Amino acid sequence: MTEGKNLPHSSADVPFRSKELRKQSLIQHTGLVGVIDEGTKTIGFSIYTTPDFKEIAAHRVELSVITPQDGWYEQDPLEMMASINKCAEEAIKQLPEQGFSASDIVTVGITNQRETTIVWDAVTGKPLYNALLWKDIRTSTTVEQIVAKVQDPNHFRSSTGLPISTYFSALKIRWLRDNVPEVRQAIRERRCKAGTVDSWIVWNLTNGALHITDVTNASRTLLMNLETQAWDPVLLKTFGIREEMLPTIHSCSEIFGKITSERSPLRGMTLSGIMGNQQASLLGQMCVKPGQTKNTYRSGCFLLCNTGDKPVFSRHGLLTTVAYKLGPQAPTIYAIEGAVSVAGHALSWLQNKVRILPDSRDAEKYAEMVPTSGDVYFVPAFTGLYAPYWRQNARGIIIGLTQFTRKNHIVRAALESICFQTRDILECMHQECGYEINKLHADGKLTTNNLLMQLQADTIGMPVFRSQLMDSTAFGAAMCAAQADGVNLCQFEPEKRYYENVHYDTFLATTTDVERKERYGKWKRAVERSLGWVIKQKKTREYTEENYRMLSSLPASIFLISSFAMLVHSLAASGQ
Amino acid sequence: MAPPSYSDLGKQARDIFSKGYNFGLWKLDLKTKTSSGIEFNTAGHSNQESGKVFGSLETKYKVKDYGLTLTEKWNTDNTLFTEVAVQDQLLEGLKLSLEGNFAPQSGNKNGKFKVAYGHENVKADSDVNIDLKGPLINASAVLGYQGWLAGYQTAFDTQQSKLTTNNFALGYTTKDFVLHTAVNDGQEFSGSIFQRTSDKLDVGVQLSWASGTSNTKFAIGAKYQLDDDASVRAKVNNASQVGLGYQQKLRDGVTLTLSTLVDGKNFNAGGHKIGVGLELEA
């Protein structure tokens, strides 16, 4: 590990805290930006100065996950809003000691967990069901229905960049309509609204005045056409979703409106930035040139590679998505994305369910007690495998156990699994995009684990640049909101200007090519052994192509047969 | 002669506002009947705004010996509709029918059993939908005496053990004049008047008020028969929406209908609609 230049070891060492520099710094400030960061496990509110984007206040709380069934993950939408209001209130309380007040907050941005879908009643404003999390797989039956209809899971890839998967909002909305009577009734009465978390937040902050989303969240629904950046009529029809239920699609950076909710301490402030959390992280780590790639290490990992102003469509299961669009007239920048569905979650699993790890935060210490994983490989396919495999019927496996295996080896193998899954995706990205990826940007809570970062560099054979911002997501969203037309707190010019926040720790590879090749080969074999584990239950109705065609032909056949029978009978009767 | 069904009360006034208008649609209807008594009907329309097309094929057969009517219908949603009806067999004025709805590719299916009985001073209707969890029962009755009509309609949801509908109606009808008033669920109050002012001119008025929202609606409409082959229609409501229609019989069995809806509040802003319909009958 190499220490980053100008790295402050603690806030006490920051030079501008001396009176003279502080005064000088205050004169330059153009206003404050607030960011609502709604992640899967935590909700936070951060406040940044401009134009230097220093975080001067923040508050975060944890969000509980409801798991009524295996593979089902839900969250309470009302708890989300209450947590956001609480965090905003607590963060604003920290402002006076920094010499600011709430009235200095010029604008607010939102960044959120993507694909997570909420349906609510437009009249009462109440959710009709809990939020279905992005990693929820209850929609697998819906996936089967839709795939049977179009015959190809990649049928919509050329228009949306996405395969038909349990992941995306369209299937969650469809599942809710088919399975929740309250949702079906609200849709029939035309009072149902559906959207991603950003839409739900904006709806609540504006008392229902705005039902909007941004193009990055919309590109994760499987309903938006990447070319037109509008809801696609073919997709709406395929999923049986009415456009009026859905939010209006906007760019990431423009004035959307004012916050009017009495319950929010942000009342009266402007809303001017919305981005999916991973796209915000890409922006926050300054990955603005084609080929620049970042990974966010959290309960899941998300790699995004900037592909510039043209979408690149994957043949190996990576997702094509909108990276950002920094204004209604700004060019749309695209990215290619791979997801690791289980990263930090594997450590939580070892702690909470398997109980071989007392605290997942001690994973580094535990894993460092052994020099290698002892040839143990852990494939954490708890809900199937995502990019680049997209296999719903895979399940987790720990392989390579011997009588010498200890729990430390398994913990280390869990860390290594995150690195191998990342490498799977980077290999795929390189093939698809054609860009040379020569370094990896990293952020997210898990990057505090130095061993993980070193293992990652060793596994991929290229430098890992760890952001010293623990969360470049909120930083990216703050920049997005601050540069909006009409807000103009600053210009987003990553090539020209120096951002105080953009400092990195660097981790260099210490392995040889031969070592990497051998270990990666073993990882591949372990993955192969995890495939095809789930065998379909006999109770499940099989939505095969043949079945669908046969069922579809029944009404016409019955009509023709009965019409002919009536005709024959009438001729016979009139002949008598 | 039995009084009309509850759902037909006030029909003459409603027809003034609905028949002969097809805003926003291109519409085609074809009807034919074979010498042996089978009716084939085809209907279709295209929405001008969304471009959506809907069509259906229908076969209807009446077996006179048994008072039996069979109807089979298939539409572009790939839904099959079947109805079997028996009339005037067990009892003069009694009609029993069973209907079903079937769309196997989406798994949707519905069924309904209907009973209707008409006598000189009484008309009663009832239907039960076929639902294993607990059917929804609809019932209505109309009493008629010397032109005066009184009606009641109710629905009972056995799944929730709850009365879900409570509608009352009162009316007066003669050959040239129909008055109808109704109270729906104790909240919606409505009235309508139909008047045949001459051999060529029919006039209708509709009025309604909702106590919950204090929403008031008022509309007036008319139909004028120009000659044996042509008629014009007009209607206007308190939302300043004006509807105009023209219907022309081109030859025996061919009828052309043109209509337009003008939004009087936003005359310059557009949003107006036109409709074209063609009916062919042989």
Image: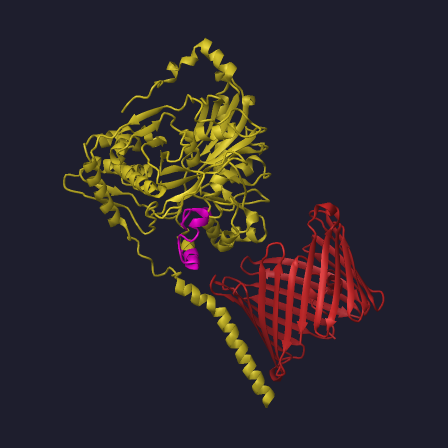
The stretch of residues the image draws in magenta is: A144-169
Q: Quadrant of the N terminus of chain B?
A: bottom right
Where on the picture, by quarter, is residue A437?
A: top left
A303 relative to A160 in the view: left or right: left
Find out whether residue A160 is within the magenta segment. yes
Where on the picture, by quarter, is residue A494?
A: top left
Q: Which chain corresponds to the colour yellow?
A: A
B43 relative to B251 in the view: left or right: left
Where on the picture, by quarter, is residue A409?
A: top left
Q: Which color scheme does this rendered protein use?
A: by chain
At x 30%, y 45%, the residue is: A381
At x 48%, y 33%, the residue is: A83
Give residue A411's position: percent from left, percent from top: 24, 36
Give residue A575's position: percent from left, percent from top: 59, 89
Find out whether residue A41 is within the magenta segment. no
- Outermost residue toward the bottom? A576
At x 68%, y 58%, the residue is: B23
Q: Nearer the viewer, residue A114 or B268?
A: B268
Could one spot residue B22 in this view of the protein?
A: no
Q: Is residue B192 above or below residue A197?
A: below
Give residue B193's position: percent from left, percent from top: 79, 61
Give residue A81's position: percent from left, percent from top: 50, 35
Q: Nearer the viewer, residue A14 or A182?
A: A14
Q: Nearer the viewer, residue A273 or A403?
A: A273
B149 relative to A104 in the view: left or right: right
Chain B tint as drawn: red
